[in-house]
Amino acid sequence: MKLVTVSGPPSSGKTSVLLKLIGLLKQEGSASGVIKFDCLYANEPVLFEKLNVPVVVGLSGNLCPDHFFVSNIQEGVNWGLSQNLDYLFTESAGLCNRCSPHIRRILAICVIDNLMGIETPKKIGPMLRMADIVVITKSDIVSQAEREVFSFRVRQANPKAKVFFVNGITGQGVFQLARMIDNANDTVTVQDNHLRFSMPAALCSYCLGETAIGGDYQVGNLRKIDFHKNKPLSNTQP
Amino acid sequence: MDESVVLADIYKNEIGQLKHLFPEIIQYLVECGINLRGKENLNLEQVLENLSENLMQDRGLDRSILRDTINYLLEEKENSLKQEEVSSITIVGGTDKTGNLENMEIILKAGSVTGIVGPTGSGKSRLLADVEWLANGDTPTKRVVLVNGFPVNATFRFSMEQKLVAQLSQNMNFVMDATAGEFVRMHAESRFAQNSEQLSEEVIAMANELAGEQFSYNTPLTSLSGGQSRALMIADTALLSRSPIVLIDEIENAGIDRKKALGLLVKKGKIILLATHDPILALLAEKRMIIRNGGIVRVIETSETEKAFLSELEVFDNRMQNLRERLRAGECIDEI
């Protein structure tokens, strides 16, 4: 079974791309399954079930969604194996832009779309920077020039990735994408494997349910903005 | 100079020098949140080595990502100087949806216009996808696409990364919040153009030649009319896009000089594929491919008779344009 992690900001087209991709793989005789990670709500299972694709939804609720992902992935792999899948796709949104579900030696796809604005590739962290494949969607509705500037910025964020333009509605480009995932590693377990990049740290009173505001209530891993210097994270001009 | 020497050397440059030599690298580092103030005398290698683990964790970075991007910027800058020459594309026929052989070879030369006609769903996008991907008998149509008469190797295929085909379609819009000039300049800079300011002035001037109504460097993109947007996209593709092939999916017939627009792309040596059912555009092409059931069934050369009709069609078209102008100017139409 080939495990592929698919990530990308909300509404970037992850599900549309996956539906087209899985549809094609099915035509070619391969069985796929999907684990959809989300926080509050996921309507996608219906769409996958229409294709007769086994799908499991994991809702993280009040937990950090990416920490939730990594605490469940090994069981996910076991589920995929029990379903006799050729491909197991995990789908998750990198909600704070600093998270990334990508795992070493496991094929990693990041889906982003042209409408997010050309500064977006700079704002997304390891989810984009450490992906093996970057899929750019919604290319059919923006100008050629914007597409070129956008893909340049994507390459700048992740020069090593293969970049594909896929139309999630017509499926154009999905054939080429399928040929890339043919080369993914076979996975029997992710036990003892590692994430490609650490997840953001969080362990403070607010993680544990505190709602009151003020210094007295803040305990744990905290950081303060220096409002006098007003230059957090040394974001200064040279 | 050997490429590896250049790559190795870039890290030996002091930050102060790099500011003039390669401002793109400096800008990238600053955007990554790396403070370069007072580090003018350190070289790039030293700056990277001195980065704190904390900063990199915060920013979701590590040194190898930084190095990869710096190397990429360097390569792109070098590539921008040596342009890949594509003088022709050959489409070697495969099969249609039912497996019938296309049995033909179509050569598309730089500076030529080829029409694509066929109903919706007939396989026009498949044909485009084959060209875009430089199909090598490995797509559902089994077509093979040759560049300059030869099959391409896998490395070239990936290095082109779909930069081969620029697309212009009716559905496309500008979504960016910038002025026309700022935007074109940004495009020029992403191509490492030396004189991006001057180039963007040229693009705007060219777009104004194609558009009926004038706009300036400072006009916001979002307030351009349909015709002006189309004109700007075409001028930008002609002067700034790296792609040797341009696929046009209809050009709206209002507010843009279509003949001049095609002429401009031809003059820039682009290989033009034109999906259209507009008689004027279709007859402007030297030949047109007829698509049916996923396959190319025929290639028709534009005949002398058809070309003769073209000038007649242009007369009709000019009369329509003229009427439009008169309505816009507030005139009453008492004769046409």
Image (tube, coloured by chain):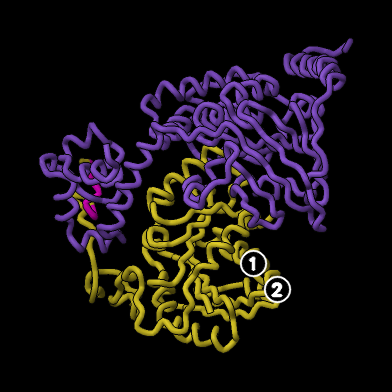
Chain colours: A yellow, B purple
Figure check: B321 above or below A22: above
Residue depicted at 40% across the width and 72% down the height = A105
Percent from the top left, x then y, of residue B240?
A: 49, 30
Q: CA distance from mark 1 to mark 2?
A: 8 Å
**Observer able to see residue A205:** yes
B140 left or right, relative to A160? right
Figure check: A174 above or below B162: below
Figure check: A238 above or below A55: above
Percent from the top left, x then y, of residue A180?
A: 53, 62
Identify residue for label 1. Answer: A19
Percent from the top left, x then y, of residue A85?
A: 59, 81
N-terminal label among 1 and 2? 1
- Amino acid type of the residue tagged 1 in the rendering: Leu
- Along the line of sight, the residue nearer the viewer: B20 or A215: B20
- Along the line of sight, the residue nearer the viewer: A42 or A162: A162
Residue depicted at 38% across the width and 58% down the height = A129
Q: Of all residues shown, which one is farthest toward the right?
A: B335
Chain letter of disc 1 in the image? A
Check residue A82 for magenta coloring: no
Quarter occupied by residue A26: bottom right
Magenta extent: A232-237
Q: Are marks 1 and 2 in contact (CB under 8 Å)?
A: yes
B297 left or right, relative to B41? right
Identify residue for label 2. Answer: A51
Q: Of all residues shown, which one is farthest toward the top?
A: B335
